[in-house]
């Protein structure tokens, strides 16, 4: 991925010495000039070939994390167990614990007694010393097979593979790089990671924005065609900085800055030297093995018939392109062109679902794809697009704050508007509202209805006891994905994020013709995000707050923002759409299977816990733990976190 993966403990010094002595720079470039299979990674490549072509997603492979082909055992999940479920992870942990106990016993006694111990002991040969066995107990890892997933990826790849090769040829890149999406996403056009990497090339938002449009209406990371051009630019830049394709491919996962640091520290661009000697907090198992995975995926994909037999490869995508002559909302565009909406969506994967659901407008000059078959004079139709209707923004007074115990039905009845209208205006899914939330009200309602309704709710709230109000808050309706997580109820459901309350601009004032306001930095926000929404350079925000270039910002920190280039409403809307997009993407691809608890230990940080322990984004952890100060974690603090699985599983 164009992001980090799961980081494990770094190599032992003993193993490094072994690598340096046997296979550090011995390269046998038998797989091509650009992408050699070095002697020191042959076993790794063979391991990933087996994962991609032999073991399926119902098989759990227990192996050594340093010497990957030291496979202790393969466990097949019982029938009916979902490979992505918590139950499946439980089986994996059990198998890992079983072999750890075996290795620990052998490390103490040095002699096998049971049949299983004999099988494990035989894997070490002359290296079967107590110290080696004890070290191996600390290097255990489990890997789920991917042969069925890889097979589906080969079938899907036919839709875009030739296009990718053509683009890479235009950028003077090796053709073999076209097989990289097999490692990233198995060519799954809808792929979305828990950390926000999207599309077949798995760009994270920050990297994608360097080369594509990434926003609430258009997210070109999801568009295989535009994302391929972005991937070509990124790979070409990586190679220009590193001068080595093995390092450039590794940088696609680890980041070019991280690989440049490795080159500087070791004083070499030799891949095997860096593979064997580089240490880094984020250069863990995923980054270290990424190049080996790529070599294995390339071999299996290029020779798929040898591994899978004949496959019904999808035909290349057929389309024609057109340029929008004016700004227009998507529903109107699709209706005017007379195109089937599903077909239009499939051809234009960069448009987010919200663009259709809320009638978001596509900018003038944007290049769209249209069906190629049949004959339709799209040019004439585009030239006759209707003028977009001006949108009126509700005035600041047309808002109402939700009180404890309110429901959408209560508010709709009191204001004499439909629940559907409230949902559409506030982009609410289901019935999710909560105390303190600010709802936008149709202008047609007027103050004559709003004020009495507000007073009614205040009176209604005053009649309730505090305990009753707390009970109502705990019963707040959650996103549909969380509602399905029945086990979560024993801990109490997480409180939804209070969008409008936490994202509003406060303390607005003008001085010498300059307007500014204050905001509290939310999770997943950076000064770069704020600068983008405010249409100002990042340095302008630093200057306004007296921040040095080296100073970092923290979630919850109060920051003044300049409001000269955009209105307050526009800034708040952009900010709201960013956070709503993160939530929609996550809940659209994952569901919460359970809520678990973790007690903070010495040395823990929220970054380390999110990326390694919980494997979920920071914003979701904050949503579940509203009272925890994550900027200063204390040992012993209990953190609630969701156990998530893919929603399609």
Image (spheres, grey):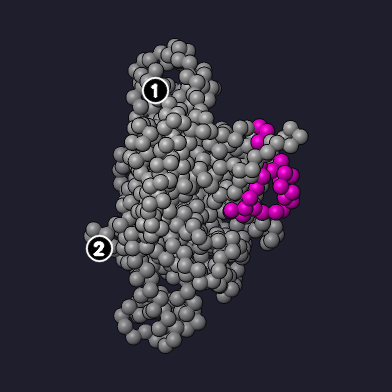
- Where residue 569 appears, as percent x and y from the top left, is 56, 34
Eyeballing the image, is 590 above or below 67? above
Q: Which residues are magenta?
A: 540-565
Q: Which residue is mark 1?
A: 334
- Residue at the spot x=72%, y=44% of the render? 544
Where is residue 73? Give x, y as percent: 35, 69
Please tell me which residue is depicted at 52% across the width and 61% down the height of the picture.
Answer: 628
| Tags 2 and 1 touching, CB below 8 Å | no
Compare marks 2 and 1 and give the one earlier in the sequence.
2
Q: CA distance from mark 2 to mark 1?
A: 47 Å
- Label 2 environment density (alpha carbons within 10 Å; few <14, some 14–19, many ≥20): few
Image quadrant of residue 38?
Answer: bottom right
Q: Is residue 582 left or right of residue 206?
A: left
Q: Is residue 551 magenta-colored?
A: yes
Residue ID for mark 2: 78
User: Can see residue 208?
Assistant: no
Nearest to the observer: residue 4 or residue 494: 494
In the image, residue 510 lies in the stretch drawn in magenta: no
Q: Name the residue located 30 percent from the left edge and 57 percent from the top edge.
A: 486
Q: How many marks?
A: 2
Check disc 1 and report its element: helix, strand or loop. helix
Q: Position of residue 302 (x, y in %)?
A: 42, 45
Dot 2 falls on a residue whose secondary structure is loop
In this view, the residue in front, 521 or 301, is: 521
Q: Nearer the viewer, mark 2 or mark 1?
A: 1
- In which image quadrant can residue 574 be found? top right
Q: Residue at x 56, y 49 (%)?
A: 522
Residue 303, horizontal then vertical, whole percent: 39, 47
């Amino acid at each position: 991925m164009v992001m980090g993966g799961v980081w494990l403990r770094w190599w032992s010094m003993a193993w490094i010495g072994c690598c340096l002595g046997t296979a550090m720079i011995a390269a046998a470039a038998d797989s091509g000039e650009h992408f050699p299979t070095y002697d020191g990674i042959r076993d790794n490549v063979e391991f990933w070939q087996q994962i991609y072509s032999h073991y399926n997603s119902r098989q759990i492979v227990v192996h050594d994390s340093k010497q990957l082909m030291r496979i202790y055992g393969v466990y097949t999940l019982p029938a009916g167990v979902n490979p992505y479920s918590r139950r499946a992870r439980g089986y994996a942990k059990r198998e890992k614990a079983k072999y750890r106990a075996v290795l620990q016993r052998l490390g103490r006694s040095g002699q096998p007694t049971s049949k299983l111990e004999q099988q494990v002991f035989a894997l070490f040969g002359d290296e079967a010393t107590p110290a080696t066995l004890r070290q191996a107990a600390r290097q255990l890892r489990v890997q789920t097979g991917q042969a069925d997933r890889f097979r589906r990826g080969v079938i899907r790849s036919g839709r875009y593979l030739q296009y990718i090769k053509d683009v890479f040829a235009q950028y003077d890149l090796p053709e073999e790089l076209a097989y990289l999406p097999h490692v990233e996403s198995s060519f799954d056009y809808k792929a979305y990671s828990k950390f926000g990497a999207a599309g077949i090339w798995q760009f994270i938002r920050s990297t994608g924005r360097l080369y594509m449009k990434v926003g609430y209406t258009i997210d070109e990371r999801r568009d295989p065609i535009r994302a391929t051009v972005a991937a070509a630019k990124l790979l070409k830049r990586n190679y220009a900085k590193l001068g080595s394709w093995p390092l450039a491919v590794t940088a696609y996962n680890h980041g070019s800055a991280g690989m440049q640091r490795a080159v500087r520290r070791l004083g070499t661009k030799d891949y095997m030297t860096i593979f064997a000697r580089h240490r880094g907090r984020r250069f863990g198992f995923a980054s270290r093995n990424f190049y080996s995975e790529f070599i294995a995926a390339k071999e299996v994909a290029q020779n798929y018939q040898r591994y899978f037999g004949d496959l019904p490869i999808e035909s290349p995508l057929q389309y024609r392109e057109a340029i929008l002559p004016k700004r227009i909302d998507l529903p109107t565009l699709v209706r005017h062109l007379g195109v089937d909406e599903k077909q239009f969506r499939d051809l234009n994967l960069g448009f987010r679902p919200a663009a259709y659901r809320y009638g978001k407008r596509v900018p003038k000059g944007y290049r769209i794809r249209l069906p190629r078959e049949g004959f339709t004079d799209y040019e004439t139709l585009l030239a006759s697009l209707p003028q977009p209707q001006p949108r009126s923004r509700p005035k600041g007074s047309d808002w109402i704050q939700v009180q404890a115990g309110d429901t959408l039905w209560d508010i709709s009845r009191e204001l004499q508007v439909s629940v559907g209208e409230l949902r559409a205006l506030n982009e609410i899914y289901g019935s999710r509202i909560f105390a303190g939330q600010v709802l936008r009200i149709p202008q047609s309602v007027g103050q004559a209805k709003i004020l009495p309704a507000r007073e009614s709710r205040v009176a209604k709230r005053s009649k309730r006891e505090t305990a009753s109000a707390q009970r109502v808050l705990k019963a707040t309706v959650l996103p549909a994905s969380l509602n399905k997580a029945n086990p979560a109820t024993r801990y109490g459901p997480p409180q939804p994020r209070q969008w409008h309350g936490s994202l509003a601009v406060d303390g607005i004032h003008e001085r010498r013709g300059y307007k500014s306001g204050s905001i509290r930095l939310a999770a997943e926000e950076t000064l770069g995000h704020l600068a983008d929404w405010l249409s100002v350079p990042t340095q302008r925000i630093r200057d306004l707050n007296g921040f040095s270039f080296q100073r970092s910002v923290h979630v919850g920190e109060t920051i003044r923002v300049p409001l000269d280039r955009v209105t307050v409403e526009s800034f708040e809307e952009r900010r709201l759409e960013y956070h709503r997009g993160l939530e929609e993407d996550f809940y659209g691809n994952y569901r919460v299977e359970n809520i678990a608890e973790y007690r903070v230990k010495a040395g823990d940080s929220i970054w380390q816990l999110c990326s390694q322990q919980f494997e979920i984004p920071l914003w979701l952890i904050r949503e579940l733990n509203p009272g925890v100060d994550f900027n200063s974690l204390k040992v012993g603090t209990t953190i609630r976190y969701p156990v998530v699985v893919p929603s399609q599983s």
